[in-house]
Image (spheres, rainbow, N blue to C red):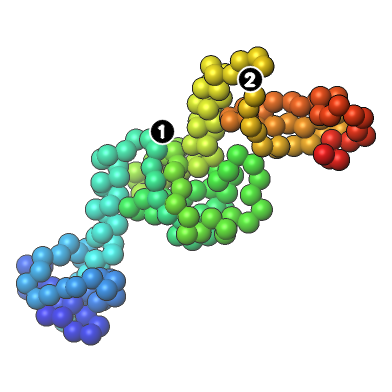
Amino acid sequence: SVSDDWVIVDVGYKAEGEVPKSHFEGAEINVGDQVDVLIEEVDESDGRIMLSKRKADRIKGWEHIVDTHNEGDVVSGRVTRKIKGGLLIDIGVPVFLPASQIAIGRVDDVAEYVGRDLECKIIKIDEPRMNIVVSHRKFLEECRDVMTSNILDEIELFQVRRGIVKNITDYGAFIDIGGIDGLLHITDMSWGRINHPSEI
């Protein structure tokens, strides 16, 4: 049966079990449906059985991830929330993205990533603890390495390329020309004299 707060499920025991309806998170549930649940507690005194659909879903999701992925694989998921030391990403199960592995550079506020979809590399699978650690930084570094390799095959002397200024120093500017930074020296910035690259 289904009420406003509970779903009563027959799990083949001498009494039915109870699942909070909130575990179905708005999904339509009807009498006669087959559902996977985890038996959390059996009260022998009154025969009451407490069930969890959320935990059953998590175990199924975990088993699927472990069966289909290995350390080093790339996975995609949405950042769900900020926690101590980093972020949680949903890839079918919640996985941990340490703050140091979010980006190549420093991230001032990790909360700005909440709600974003990220591609990450699995760097650790701890099966006994049902814990997975991922790195967006390693994914970015590998992408950068591929771009660098590709552009080194493409660039030639006297090519004209468009780039983005990444850093300015007293002696020039470093410009990203598509995966690799090149130095534009202050003496090559203008036909006239300039005192500092920031002037242009």
Residue plotted at (25% across, 46% down)? 64
98, above or below 160, in the image: below
- Determine whether, in the image, residue 96 is placed left or right of residue 155: left
Q: CA distance from mark 1 to mark 2?
A: 37 Å
- Which corner quadrant holds the N terminus? bottom left
Q: Residue furthest front?
A: 191
- Which corner quadrant holds the C terminus? top right
Residue plotted at (6% across, 67% down)? 12
- Determine whether, in the image, residue 149 is placed left or right of residue 125: right
Circle 1 residue: 72
Earlier along the polypeptide chain: callout 1 or callout 2?
1
Which quadrant holds residue 163? top right
Marks 1 and 2 in Cβ contact (< 8 Å): no
Q: Which amino acid, by three-letter code, is at mark 2? A: Gln
Q: Residues within 10 Å of mark 1 (few under 14, many from 20)?
A: some
Q: Residue furthest top?
A: 157
Q: Percent x, y for residue 189?
A: 81, 29
